[in-house]
Image (tube, rainbow, N blue to C red):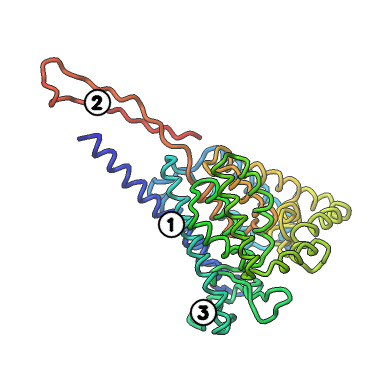
Amino acid sequence: MLAETSAASIRQIYRSETRIDIALLVSALFLQRFSLQFGKTFLTLDLVPVAFILLHQFLSGKLVIHYERLLWFLALGLATTCSLLMNFKSAKLTSYFLFLVLYSLMTLSRPSTLDQYKSTLQVFQFLVMLLSCIAIAQFPAQFVVDGAKLIMFYGMIPDFLMAGAGGMHTIHPIEGITTLLKSNAIFLAEPSTLSQITALGILIEVLEFRRPRYMLVMVPGFLLAYSGTGLMTLLLLLPLAGLSHGRVALSALLVVMSALGLFAIGVIDLSVFVSRSAEFEETGSSGFARFVAPVLLAAEFVDTVSLQAFLVGSGPGTGSSVVGWLRPFYEYGIIGAFVIVCFLTSCLRRSRCPKLVLAALIFSYLFLMGFLDPSILTLIIVLCTLNGPEPRRGRVDITYPPSHPASTLTANYRWRSLHDT
């Protein structure tokens, strides 16, 4: 009876944790286009509920601060504060505080079982499939209604909540086709974000669940974004996934065949993807900005920068125009960049996240503007850092008293939870 009660309470705890993960993922995926303006600063609404949820969980005793992560975060705070103080006139306080808030959330962890983590992955997959369905419906809807007005919710959302998305390429025509827009699933900031999210969903589905109905929905959603960001992720990691074992290889083959089928029947214009291969040579393209420009800027930065800027950077917020992995080095110098790498390594070490999925998230972080992106960092928190090692159970002592019948069996359960730091 005690065992049944204990098992029921544990299941209830896991259901509660799954609901928390649902709230975090919905915030990251469905609120990223909305923001509140404070003067010239915009506070994105995907960050607000995430911060409050995790803070409430911590104050309720359901989350703990990982000791090793905390030590590296203190070093990180020291490095960023030094950069701020030594560049106070040019640095931006909002960027400094945003950085500390976002990365402090990565120090939190909770014990969880493998089954509980699998349920979190299933929730993420369902949300990705839902976004894919919206993206698929969004594309043909352009033949009936104004695609730009559809993306802007036909004025149902107040303009002041969407003012912070002015710098995003939310409304993005397909190259060579000026009348049709790339799908962004309406709620995502850019079509490239849809491409990244669906590529991540496809990779998780191939590795963990292998459900054909999910893959057959995610593939067209991925392709209708007409973006090369998620495509690079799959080109790099899907072949590696196929080498795992036979069932994974068959699922990866299903993804490839589905894409080829959509190209063959003309639903997806293959020439748009082929033409994007030249972006690495075009200075104004996103491919050049994400993969080539940081290397050129890094070489120029090292040659021309002062010793102080090389060591502690130019200050928080000064690298807002710098894309990708170079921005931490530009803002916080070689010392700050080194501490950031060490902090992230401590957070991602022994993660439950499948290794290839972890590689995809790191790729997005390094090359796809993930340094201060609350959405990508929230996904890393939920899928990689939040679910820690499960509590270990002590031995169960069962005593059969000789003078009592079996129905009066007494069980002495000794349970101890050791949090592995």
Say few, some or many: other residues with alpha carbon within 10 Å of mark 1 (under 14 / 14 to 19 / 20 or more): some
SS of the residue at dot 1? helix
Dot 3 corresponds to which residue? 153
Image quadrant assignment for residue 243: top right
Say few, some or many: other residues with alpha carbon within 10 Å of mark 2 (under 14 / 14 to 19 / 20 or more): few
Dot 1 corresponds to which residue? 22
Which mark is drawn over residue 412? 2
- In the orientation shown, which residue stands out farthest toward the front? 265
- Of callouts 1 and 3, the N-terminal one: 1
Between circles 3 and 2, the one closer to the viewer is: 3
User: Dots 3 and 2: beta carbons under 8 Å?
Assistant: no
Which of the two residues, 287 or 66, is positioned nearer the viewer here? Answer: 287
Image quadrant assignment for residue 370: bottom right
Residue 363 at what x, y percent from top left? 66, 51
Above or below: residue 323 compared with residue 162: above
SS of the residue at dot 2? strand
Q: CA distance from mark 3 to mark 2?
A: 60 Å
Which mark is drawn over residue 293? none
Q: Is residue 181 visible?
A: yes
Say few, some or many: other residues with alpha carbon within 10 Å of mark 3 (under 14 / 14 to 19 / 20 or more): few
Between circles 1 and 2, the one closer to the viewer is: 1
Q: Residue placed at 66% from the left, 67% from the top?
A: 226
